[in-house]
Every structure is written in structure tokens, then in C-alpha cells.
Image: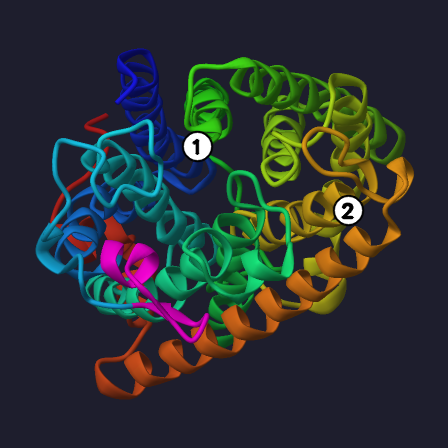
Amino acid sequence: MNAADNAFILVSAALVMFMTPGLALFYAGLVRSKNVLGTIMQSFIMLGLVSVIWAVVGYSLAFGTDIGGVIGGLNFSFLNGVGMDVVNSPASNLPHMTFMIFQCMFAVITPALITGAFAERMKFGAFMVFAILWVILVYCPMAHWVWGGGWMGEMGALDFAGGAVVHMSSGAAALAAALCLGPRKGYGKEPIIPHNLPMTVTGAAILWFGWFGFNAGSALAADGLAASAFVATHMAAAAAALSWIVVEWMHHGKPTTLGAASGVLAGLVAITPAAGFVGPMSAIIIGLAAGVICYLGVLLKSKLGYDDSLDVVGIHGIGGTWGAFATGLFASVGAEGLFFGNPAQLWIQVVSIVATWLFCFIMSYALFKIVDAIIGLRVDPESEESGLDVSEHSETGYQL
């Protein structure tokens, strides 16, 4: 065990944990005031639900003994054999328990990301059932494919910190959610505007802060690679914030605070798969492109007619896809992409992108339909009108 690495990864795990409450604030500021607590709850409760699933069976399915390149075995169920030393640890420099809890925080935030797609209209109980099924049947296989010895990692797909595992998977599920639940009441006919943008910017700042644990921590050591990933993460986020507001300025006539926050998130998403494989200048290019691509991606929902309430598809789905593709172009640290002499890497990245979208969308769509058939996905019109805070939780966010 390396004590410095252990300390660094434990702090990184804490940073990733903090991202989920940050996401709760980011999303909550974007909904109407009658849904602020319901939106926060959907993210916050994942810290409880997914952590327990991860300890009981999720970690084993993701990182247990490989079964056919598809899923992990049950040898680590109930954290059996996951101890305070490096025995059986996927990272030989870290206690097995440190690696497990770091990966747990990734599993926690991923289903929370999906909630932005169905904000203001899904039953809390239905979401809880969906989340249980989705983590076990979608997230864990994806984590195994990429990081746990599965076929995608063996193929050579590069995903440093979760472009496919976290962002494309949640983006594909978000698209399935928007299609299964349909638009919010009044969507496209009456103004549905964010109720608290300072809350959203606060959430974006927490996400930016936590993302250093997300990406730099994925080096799994306190070394130069962690520093490189840290710098790439920051530069991509900074560049995307600028490019988003520039294209927004050109398109709408004014730059917005929400645009700056969305741009930061787009850059962070896009650099996630590439963070440990690219240098700072490549990261800036990836970020600049992400701001423009994700801005255009957000515009797609009005063109195509689906109500992705808080732009999960446009930012996480499309941003993660661009990031995975860009990794195949710009990789130069520990692997080479197209621009550094290895065109085969780009093809591998494309295969991984297509496989991720197909698997995660089809599985998520099926799970939404199953939950809908059993208990129903959507609150009734009266509950939607009164707001989820009152109808689902008997609370109000503000006493004015």
C-alpha cells in the first residue's frame, strides 16, 4: 500500500461524493419553485440507495471475477474479501476498500444525472424502483465492460473517468425517459423558467470542484498523471464556458449566466473520458468544441419535440459522445489517437460509442416501460400542477 496514494484517493472519493449534492443544487435551481425539494430529493437519496446496492451486489457485478467479458461474478458480494489491504484490489497500490468506495461515488451520481430528463413529473417511488434496476442491469455491466476486465476495455477503448460509463449511459437513459414520460404539462405552450439561477451556479461550482476528484482521482495514484488529468479537466471546463457563451451571444444576442454554467458542465463532461490521455492544449480544443456542440445539442430537443427538462441528453449524452470520439483523435499520453499516429484508436472509440448508446438506451427504455406497467411512472395532472414538493413529499421549499 502507498499511503500517499491512499490519502489522495480517499480525498478524491469525498470530492466525487460532494458532486451529487452539487448536482442536486444545479438541477433544483432550474425547476420551478414548487418542485425544488422533489428535484433535490431525487439526487440526494441516491447517496443512500446506490451506496447500499453497491456494497451488497453492485461492486461485485462491476469488478468481480470476469464472466465472458460481460459481467463480474458474485465473489465480492456483501463486500466479501474487500478489506483494508491490497489483496484482490484492482489497484495494487491501494487498499481494496479504498478502490471500492471511490468507485461507489461514481455509481451514486450516474442515476442522479438521469433525473434531469424527467424533472417535475415522475413519481418518487417509480424512480426508486427504476434506479435499483438500472444500477444493477445497466451501470454495473457498463462499469465492468470498461474498467472491470470486460470486453470494451479488452478491445482497447479509452475511457479514463467515465465518458461511456457515466455520461453516455445517463444520456441514453435520459432520452429513454423523455420519450417514455412525455412532455411536462404546458411544455411549449407556457413559460417554464428556472426559479433560482444562483442556486444553479452554486451547484455548477461544486460540480467543477468535485470533478477534480472525479478525473484526477481516476489516475488512482498521487502522481504526474493525476496532475495532467487535473489540468486537462480545468482547461476544458474553462474553454467550454467561453465557447458556450460566445455561440449563445451570437445566436440570442446576449450571454447568460445559465449559459456559462452549462458550458462549464459541457466541458467537464467532454474531458472526462480523455482527461488522462491528452495534454492541456488538446483539452482546450476539446472544451472549445464541447461548448458549441452541446449548445447545438440542447437546441435539438425543440427541433425533435422531446422534453428533456434539464438538458441531460444535450450535455451529458452528446458531450460524453464528443469526449469519447475526441479521445480517439487527441490521445497522446499513455496512448495515441488519430492525430498522434494511431487511426485504429478512433475506430475502437466509435465502436464503444455505438455499443454504449444501443445497450443503455434499449435497456433503459425497457426498464421504464416495465416500471410504468407495474406502478406507473408519472404523477397525475393535479399533482403535477401542485408540484412534486407537496404531492410527493408533503413539504415546501420556501415559506414566503
Locate the C terminus and report the quarter of the image it occupies: top left
| Magenta region includes residue 174 | no
Q: Is residue 308 visible in the rendered structure shown here?
A: no
What amino acid is found at the position of numbered circle 1 in the picture?
Phe
Q: How is the image coloured?
A: rainbow
Q: CA distance from mark 1 to mark 2?
A: 30 Å
What amino acid is found at the position of numbered circle 2 in the picture?
Gly
Q: Residue 157 occupies which quadrant of the picture?
A: bottom right
Q: Is residue 10 above or below residue 296?
A: above
Disc 1: which residue: 26
Identify which residue, 17 or 55, lies in the foreground.
55
Quick one: label 2, few (<14), some, or many (20+) residues within 10 Å? many
Disc 2: which residue: 328
Please report the bounds of the magenta region as a residue range.
59-72
Q: At x 47% / y 26%, what residue is drawn?
A: 211
Q: Disc 1 or disc 2, which is closer to the eye?
A: 2
